[in-house]
Amino acid sequence: MSCGCFGGSVVKRRQSTARATGGIDEQLIRTVNHFSYDQLKLATDDFHSSNKIGRGGFGTVYKGILKDGTEVAVKTLAAQSKQGAHEFLTEINTISNVKHPNLVELIGCCIQGANRILVYEYVENKSLDKVLLDQRSTNIQLDWSKRSAICMGIARGLAFLHEELVPRIVHRDIKSSNILLDKDFNPKIGDFGLAKLFPDNITHISTRIAGTTGYLAPEYALGGQLTMKADVYSFGVLVLEIISGRSSSKTNWGGTMRLLLEWAWQLHEEGKLIEFVDPELGEFPEEEVLRYMKIAFFCTQAAANRRPLMSQVIEMLGRNVRLNEKELTAPGFFQDGEASSSKKSLESSAATSYQMSSVPVSITEVIPR
Ligand SMILES: Nc1ncnc2c1ncn2[C@@H]1O[C@H](COP(=O)(O)OP(=O)(O)OP(=O)(O)O)[C@@H](O)[C@H]1O
């Protein structure tokens, strides 16, 4: 049995013409590590319920131990799931043979009879939504140093997908339940079942809308215009969840029907942003936390071409920079089929072809130490 056997470092600037067409690459399937059903049956003790670690839209997930001692997560596709069958191939098509410390590694798959199973590296510390939104029952305290490192790790994973791979990958479903935390709370982006490949010369595509409300960029939710900036928007929402310890899937924040982002923006306009911070956070560096929130606002601006690239977000998070707030424009919201703010800029953003270079360069200025 081969496992974890790809070796080498991060795969960068990979080339594949078949991938570039967005089609499923038969040849690629052959290069993926294949497990037999019996190997996975053995690894999971016959898919024993005591090894069950979760259940998602795709099917049930089990913990398994391979013959060589490697711990794995074994994701079984529920029978009859057409959507799942598509996501199964999309996962293989997008992230097989791609390695990065902030991406959940796909170790291999099993295609045998009716069985469709994906095998991933096992990530110890549950998903971010569970740890963040249910800190008491998980007994895990996420202090600021962990939370800021989680933001940075996710940003690095996204920058890698958007800017270092060929073709580039837009994840399309960045949300806290798709971020897993390893034993050191290093975040790993998982669940590439909705991902789209972007060849170098393509800046946007029109596509069927998929993803999770609350995280959806308005130009994508309303017009199906997909660019990397849709992931940047979702990342901004995720940062707000990480800072506030509150879920973006609820819509009753601030004592009325309001999205998390809407509430955060309102507090910003009232100069009361500090009220947004998670009461469970403990001590925190106020200036830095507020800076992270403003970075989230830059990421969630209504006009997609005003949002930074993920590499710029990494700079903004990591360096002691003062954000040029004059460049900041209102966020775009999508709720129940309608954009609730900034309709004008939204319409113009949906009509724009986004270029990597069209991002304002003056978002930040370095503060001399
Ligand atoms: N590689 C992994 N290592 C450890 N646990 C995992 C791994 N992958 C998934 N899990 C666990 O299984 C659960 C279900 O994961 P899955 O990706 O199938 O669904 P989801 O992302 O929670 O939901 P949905 O499919 O609706 O987006 C996760 O919440 C997590 O607890």
Image (cartoon, rainbow, N blue to C red):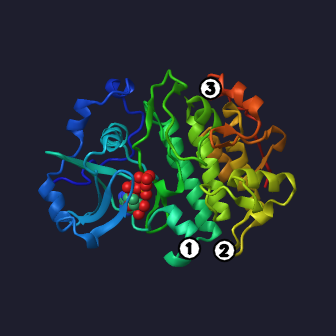
First in residue order: circle 2 vs circle 3: 2
Where, by quadrant of the figure, is residue 122 drawn?
bottom left
Image x and y of residue 365, in percent: 78, 43
**What residue is shown with label 3?**
354
First in residue order: circle 3 vs circle 1: 1
Residue 15 seen from this side: yes
Vertical arrangement, residue 137 with respect to residue 305, above or below: below
Image x and y of residue 78, in percent: 28, 51
**What residue is shown with label 2?**
280
Badge 1 element: helix
Question: Observer-nearest residue: 149 or 210?
Answer: 210
Q: Which amino acid, by three-letter code, is at mark 2?
A: Glu
**What residue is shown with label 1?**
135
Give the label, 3 or 1, closer to the camera.
Answer: 1
Q: Which amino acid, by three-letter code, is at mark 1?
A: Gln
Badge 3 element: loop
Q: Residue furthest right?
A: 270
Which mark, by number, is residue 45?
none
- Label 1 within 8 A of ligand 1 by Cβ: no
The crowd level at tag 3 (other Cα within 10 Å; few <14, some 14-19, many 20+) is: many
- Label 3 within 8 A of ligand 1 by Cβ: no
Query: Left or right: 89 with respect to 361?
Result: left
Give the residue displayed 49% in from the left and 42% down from the top. 160
Give the residue displayed 62% in from the left and 26% down from the top. 354
Vertical arrangement, residue 13 with respect to residue 278, above or below: above
Vertical arrangement, residue 225 with respect to residue 100, above or below: above
- Image quarter for ligand 1: bottom left
